[in-house]
Every structure is written in C-alpha cells, then in structure tokens.
Image (cartoon, helix red, strand yellow):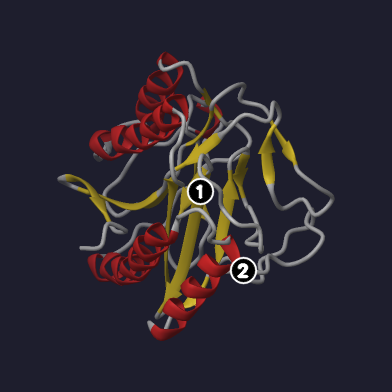
Amino acid sequence: MRRPRTARLKSPEEVEKIRRAGRVVYAVLRRVAQMAEPGVSTAEMNAVAEAMIREAGAEPLFKGVQTRQTAFPFPAALCTSVNDVVVHGIPSERTLQSGDVVSVDCGVRLDGYCGDSATTLCVGTVAPEVRRLLEVTEEALWIAVEGIRPRRWWSEIAGAMQAHVEAAGFSVVREFVGHGIGREMHEEPKIPNYVDRRQDFMLQAGMVLAVEPMVNMGSAGVQYADGTNWPVVTADGRYAAHFEHTIAVTDAGADVLTDGR
C-alpha cells in the first residue's frame, strides 16, 4: 500500500487562526444562501462575496488560481456550480431559475491561514429526487464529521460515506477529492470520499482537513464542460451536489472550523 505524504500537524493556536478564516467563509455562504432566488445571477452572488471578504480583511483563495490544464486563472472568489456542474463553476450573468440547484464553494486566507467550505442550495421549487440528492450528500459530510477521531484509518470513514451515498442510488465522484488545509489551500493528505487504499492514512490529533463529498445523481463520471478546463460537469448531464467543511482532528473527535462558531 502506498502511503501519502504526512500532513503537517497544527498547533491549537493555528487551529484557532484557521477557525477565524472559517468564520469569514461561513458568513459569506450564509449571505449567499439568502440570495439563492430565481432571477439572481451567480455574478451578483460573487460580487457580494468579494465585498464581504475584503471588508473582513481577508483574501479570496480561488481568485487567480491557475493550473497547467486551465486556460486562464480562476476569475472569482466563489465557485458557483449550477445543476450538472459538479465543481469549479465560474460566476456569470446567467440568472438562477426555479428548480435549479447551485453549489457554492468559498475559500479565504486570513492572517496567513485558510478556511474552505461549500454548500449546495435549492432555488425555488426543486424536484423531490434532487432535494434528496442534496440531503444525502450533506449527510455523507456529517458521517465524516461524526466518524473522525485519532488513530482511525480514513478508509473506514470514506467507506461509510460511500455506502450511504450508494445505498440512496447516487454516485460518488472519483476524480476530485478533499485535502489537508492550513497555510495553503491544498496540503497533504488527499481525502477521497470513497475507499481508496492507495490514499489511505491514519487520523491524528492536529490534522486539519477539508472534507468535501461530491455526489452525482446518475453515474460517477465527469468531464470538462468547455475548453477552459474549469467547470467540471456530470458526464450524463444529471444534477450534482457538493458540501464541504474544514475540520480539525482533536483528541475528542472532530472540531468543525467553518460552522460559524
């Protein structure tokens, strides 16, 4: 079995700094959730988010990020992924319609430390099976929160998440996973939402993890939506959901750092 590189453990003082960044993320997502109504554009959501992040003295984590695969740096503070967009949706002037869902992912750096969280929001009247998709995905995140404790293998938790999703008839995305977080947005280890022994690791007090189940209504397959290599969509065009929290591992279990406390 290949072991991933070990996460750098965080001190209690560092955890509190990450929590401060997490409070900014929580406030942004709470405000954006209030905006998720028919006729509102995702660009409007992003403008509000950018203003809130500036006012908090923080900086957006996603804006300006570029990889070797992408055509240009990510242009916004929020990823806004509508309907069949799984992750990395770019805010636009497109207005939300009743029946849509929009996954909103927000990350900030405050005083050198990062917080990252995501939620999927219903717009207007959403079909019952779509609402169920969101419920199951969020439940998978909370299965992780409740299962986290030191000296436990991550695969045990990922297996419970995967089983819960698949029992509901949905699919766990394989191509994108969670990550460690701290001074950088993406740190070791990689955190799959399904059983992958190659990326397994043992939880230790002091780890800080961004756990983010991404779940498709249909098949698990995804693809890039266009030539930019930013928006990732479901291969079958069916809806997706995405929830995320930044979580510290403590001797007592999990401490959610992006829940506003």
Q: CA distance from mark 2 to mark 1?
A: 14 Å
194 shown above or below 163: below
Q: Count neighbours of disc 2 (C-alpha within 10 A) and say few if under 14, some if 14 to 19, many if 20 or more.
A: many
Residue at 57% in and 33% down: 239
Above or below, 209 relative to 86:
below
Q: Amino acid at mark 1?
A: Ser
Depth order, front residue of 24/47: 47
Q: Quadrant of residue 261?
A: bottom left
Q: Is residue 110 left or right of residue 204?
A: right
* Residue 240 on image: x %, y %: 55, 35
The image shows residue 30 at horizontal and vertical percentages of 34, 61
What residue is at 59 percent from the left and 22 percent from the top? 218
Identified at 48% across, 74% down, the residue is 48
Q: Which residue in the protein does label 2 denote?
A: 76
In the rendered image, residue 156, in percent from the top left (x then y), is placed at: 36, 25
Residue at 63 percent of width and 42 percent of height:
85
Q: Position of residue 91 (x, y in %)?
A: 62, 61
In primary-sequence order, the first of circles 2 and 1 is 2
**Three-letter amino acid code at the position of disc 2:** Ala
Q: Is residue 161 left or right of residue 44?
A: left
Q: Quadrant of residue 94?
A: bottom right
Which quadrant of the figure has residue 80? Answer: bottom right
Using residue 33 as the reference point, say whether residue 198 is left or right of it.
right
Residue 158's disc number? none
- Secondary structure under tag 1 reads strand
In this rendering, the answer to whether 239 lies above or below 212 is: above
Q: Which residue corresponds to mark 1?
A: 103
Q: Quadrant of the N terminus?
A: top right
